[in-house]
Image (spheres, grey):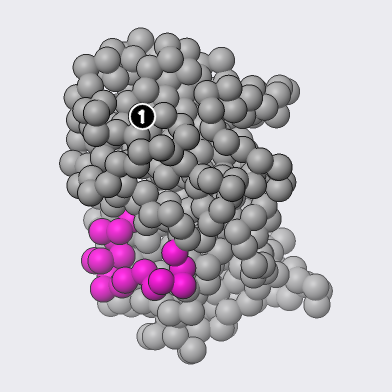
Amino acid sequence: MYDLVIVGAGPAGATLARLAGAHLRTLLVERRTDRPGPGPGSAKCCGGLLAPEAQRALVALGLGVPRSVLAGPQLFAVRAVDLASGRERHYPRHYLNVDRGRFDAWLRALVPASVEIRTGVRVAGLRDSGRRVALALESAAGTELVEARLVVGSDGASSIVRARAFPGHPEPDAYLAIQEWFEASAADPWYTAVFDPAVTDFYGWAIPKDGRVLVGAALRPGTGASARFDRLVAALRGRGLRLGRSLGREGALLRRPRRPAHLVIGGGRVALVGEAAGFVSPSSAEGLSRAIRSGAALAAALAPGLAGWEERYRAATAGLRRELLAKSLEAEVLFRPLLRRAAMATGLGAVPAGEAPPDWCGRAVAVGLSPAPESAPPWSGPTGRGP
């Protein structure tokens, strides 16, 4: 029997396994298998930008991102575009542009050798007897039953662990994140956040990455989502975004927590971290920093032992939960089209027009921009699932 079985080897699961695996008998399972990138299907559907929040989370753990994980170009500004009004603004914001597949592989490589890691494995069943949890794990080799003293769901927005262990809890609002990769001989050197109420009540993005451009959007699921995404791509082309041949399209579920009940840290012998717990910003969909922070918080809660973990984990994530609820209130105001346009019209926090890139063709590039302050607009934080 394992002390700890972690389902999902993304940033939350890998962080937890690295910090807790040295003193607990740990199994880390992941349904994906490593594939080279960048490109559709190469990794989790994610824009692969580390916002300042994620950078601070890594610094707090004493980690620095290696050069092998970086993608180009590095970005120093967000370009906010409101397609309905035609207004554009540039806001200083420093990102680390990474290859998401290599980033996740790097975090997994930091996990101690004492942790057993299996890929290509999915959870087919879960039963909590009160004293231990039985998991049915499916892989190419068949189905295996394992037992653990504590199971942790770090398996993202469509968490099987959350659905099986806590079926009565309300789920955060569901969005479909669609991304399409395009060839680009000359990519524009900034991250673009796009708003169009006819497409989505959230937002879209365009990110240059190693000679390609990644265009994405968080859309309400249902009939017409693909057509609405096509409309966004066409609008960006119409505004001069240079997109070459399509290299493929991918999609994934994105959760957007709006109220306290959407955040579930777990209980009994099942814990949740990262997106599975609902730790995603409702204003920007940024999840990487929250994944790393929640994984580290649970590891700290387990350091004294498994007994009493829930109370310690709840205390350790109190600030994170308050932060997300504040972001929810912020989103209710700033994602109203009229208020967003009014905020953009003020130019507050924006780079003066003469200092920003004058068009989409990259004839002038803003350099030396300092990171944005904490009051940066909500669209300036790329996601763990989207940008």
Q: Residue furthest front?
A: 363
Position of 315 with respect to 191 (left or right) is: left
Position of 174 with respect to 323 (left or right) is: right
Quarter occupied by the N terminus = bottom right
Observer-nearest of 139 and 232: 232
- Is 47 placed above or below 81 here? below
- Is 105 placed above or below 78 here? below
Asked whether 66 falls inside the magenta stretch, the response is yes
Position of 172 with respect to 307 (left or right) is: right
> In the rendered structure, which segment of residues is drawn in magenta?
54-70
Residue 106 percent coordinates (x, y): 47, 73
Observer-nearest of 210 and 13: 210
Asked whether 178 falls inside the magenta stretch, the response is no
Please identify the quarter of the rendering in which residue 79 is found: top left
Q: Amino acid at mark 1?
A: Pro
Observer-nearest of 277 and 250: 250
Q: Secondary structure at mark 1?
A: loop
Residue 386 percent coordinates (x, y): 51, 43
Residue 199 percent coordinates (x, y): 57, 21
Residue 310 percent coordinates (x, y): 34, 60
> Image point 20% across, 35% down: which residue?
375
Observer-nearest of 336 and 142: 336
Q: Residues within 10 Å of mark 1 (few under 14, many from 20)?
A: few
Q: Which residue is mark 1?
A: 358
Q: Count of labels shown?
A: 1
- Say if residue 41 shows up in the picture: yes
